[in-house]
Amino acid sequence: MSPAEIRLTDLTVSHARRPAVHHLSGRFAPGSLTAVVGPNGAGKSTLLRALAGLHRPDAGRIEGAAGQIALLPQATALDRAFPIGCLDVVLFGLWGGSGAFRAISRAGRERARAALVAVGLEGFERRPVGSLSVGQFQRVLFARLLLQDAPVILLDEPFNALDARTAADLLAMVHRWHGEGRTVVAVLHDLEMVRREFPQALLLARDCLGWGPTAEVLTAANRLRARMMAEAWAAEPEPCERRDAA
């Protein structure tokens, strides 16, 4: 399945009617590789959750994404205390096709083992995820994405707190997905990596301050504007009043 264009029209997403993403319009072209950047609290993770269908928009539309997306959440948001092995975590990637209560086939298990090998974790099938390092656990989550085999991949801070070798290995996998024609959208904080590795960027400070070629978006003026907007945010912002889409 080839990825569809993902189009956002006047998209507003809020928590308890407090704006997190504010009147965002634009498009992720099929097969594009885009970094979403901005200050803390800018709505970056909220945008990914909305794209994945996990956070209902208050206003506006998301078109073209349904049924095509795999989401990698922030690793810090996941509880690793539950006693589960690496292979079982990877097998969750098959739930979309097999259902949560159907038995996984032998072929599915072989695919999961192959995915662990692909991310450098051969022999980790029964290793409890609670015993893994941060980098090893992120490799497990990337293996799960391999099994999902989605045309659109959303990554929320995929390289946060990783050692250099793990980050390089997983970045190579991101480029592999891009080379296969998949649409990849990643929330990132490392602007040098964004400039070097991601041809497209979306700069968010709740409002969109730039969306397009990375060099045109991450200008000094735009970055200063984002920082100033973040410093001016109220602790309790006013509810967003819906406006008609243009």
Image (cartoon, grey):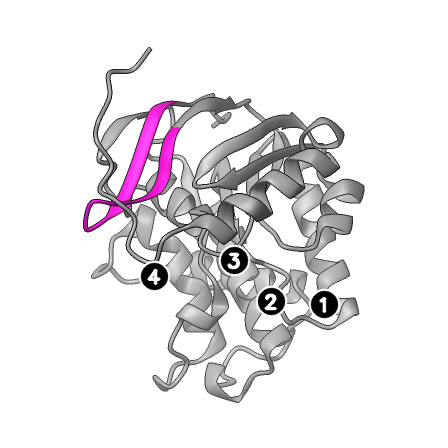
Callout 3 crowding tier (Cα within 10 Å): few <14, some 14–19, many ≥20: some
Callout 4 crowding tier (Cα within 10 Å): few <14, some 14–19, many ≥20: some
Do we see residue 37 in this rendering? Answer: no
Task: Name the residue carrying label 3.
Answer: 111
- Tag of residue 104: 4
Tag 2: residue type? Arg
Q: In this view, does 30 lie to the left or right of 19?
A: right
> Based on the displayed image, in which of its 4 quarters is residue 139 positioned?
bottom right
> Which x, y percent locates residue 224?
65, 42
Q: Is residue 216 left or right of residue 90?
A: right
Give whichever of 228, 22 is nearer the camera.
Answer: 228
Q: Which of the two marks, 1 or 4, is nearer to us in this view?
A: 1
- Tag of residue 166: 1
Give whichever of 222, 117 is nearer the camera.
Answer: 222
Task: Say what secondary structure mark 2 lies in.
Answer: helix
Magenta-colored span? 9-23
Query: Between disc 1 and disc 4, whose residue precedes?
Result: 4
Q: How far apart are marks 1 and 4 (CA)?
A: 29 Å
Q: Distance between the residues labelled 4 and 2?
A: 21 Å
Task: Name the residue carrying label 2.
Answer: 139
Do we see residue 23 in this rendering? Answer: yes
**Looking at the rendering, in which quadrant would you find the C terminus?**
top left
Task: Say what secondary structure mark 3 lies in.
Answer: helix
Q: Residue at 80%, 43% (x, y): give it.
A: 196
Query: Between disc 4 and disc 2, whose residue precedes?
Result: 4
Tag 3: residue type? Arg
Give whichever of 6, 240 is nearer the camera.
Answer: 240
Q: Is residue 214 left or right of residue 2?
A: right
Q: How far apart are marks 4 and 3 (CA)?
A: 11 Å
Q: Is the magenta stretch mostly helix, strand or loop?
A: strand
